[in-house]
Image: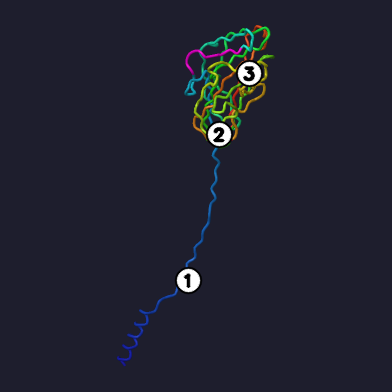
Amino acid sequence: MKKHILGAVALSATLITTTTPTFAAAVTGTATVNVSWNTQSTATLQLFTNYAAAGTEGAGNPTIATAANGGGGTCTATGGGAETAGSAVAATGAGAAAATAATLKYGQITPDTTNTTDCNYENAINALVTTTSSNWSLTEAVAGTPAGFNFCAFANNATGKFPFAAGKLAAQQTAFAAGAPAEPTVGTCTSGATNGASLAAALTLITNGTAVNASNYGEDLELQVPANAPSANSTATITYTLTAN
């Protein structure tokens, strides 16, 4: 009897050590979270007058050239003296006016009795733009110009024309160092070989601009003085609007 019991026990032990249990297959589940954000464009605009070769505010008196158009009118060659830059302004959306305005002084002007007198302010205004926007525009408009007067803007860039090209641009200075462009008819700014733009209506300097860091948009600004212009202390306001979308 003992031999039979031991054999059974030995057999039972062998079965226990060689049997492998069966488990259920693993199940994996995944879930996702969608993340979104909107990065606002940033932009700054600063205006420099009588600007230097680097595009920054010029020192000393400006240079104002006369085109008398066959008459005897004259402009003061040094204008009204040294100028001051406008303060930088941050702009998003529709842009804003500078907190502190720049100055642009033509000084004394003697009109002719018959012909238009053109006073070209060389390197008059440089707009310095920095923006992260990939779709922005810069416009210029003048308000308060007395009746009979007009401003002609001349682009200081590679083509001498508006609008400016996209991309970062280095400052460029006047193409009229040899003398003022002659514009004998008030309101017309494209006589001869010039490519001026009248500021009788708003002017687009650049549109569909790309992101830039310290890009320059400079111009000469010529004041057209009509014959027999009345004696007056006149002012006008030029507004640049940077719209960064």
Please tell me how crowded label 1 is: few (under 14), some (14-19), or many (20+) other residues with Cα within 10 Å: few
Residue in the foreground of this view, choosing between 191 and 136: 191
Magenta region's main secondary structure?
loop
- Which of the 4 image quarters holds residue 145? top right
Gap in Å between the C-alphas at discs 2 and 3? 25 Å
- Mark 2 secondary-structure assignment: loop
Report the mark closest to the observer, 2 or 1.
Answer: 2
Amino acid at dot 3 = Phe
Q: Is residue 1 left or right of residue 245?
A: left
- Which of the 4 image quarters holds residue 139? top right
Q: Which residues are magenta?
A: 58-67
Q: Is residue 61 magenta?
A: yes
Q: Is residue 9 left or right of residue 53?
A: left
Amino acid at dot 2 = Ala
CB atoms of marks 3 and 1 within 8 Å? no
Residue with the mark numbered 2:
166
Residue with the mark numbered 1:
24
The residue located at (63%, 21%) in the rendering is: 192
CB atoms of marks 2 and 1 within 8 Å? no
Amino acid at dot 1 = Ala
Residue in the foreground of this view, choosing between 193 and 50: 193
Of mark 2 and mark 1, the one earlier in the sequence is 1
Q: Which mark is residue 151?
A: 3
Gap in Å between the C-alphas at discs 3 and 1? 87 Å
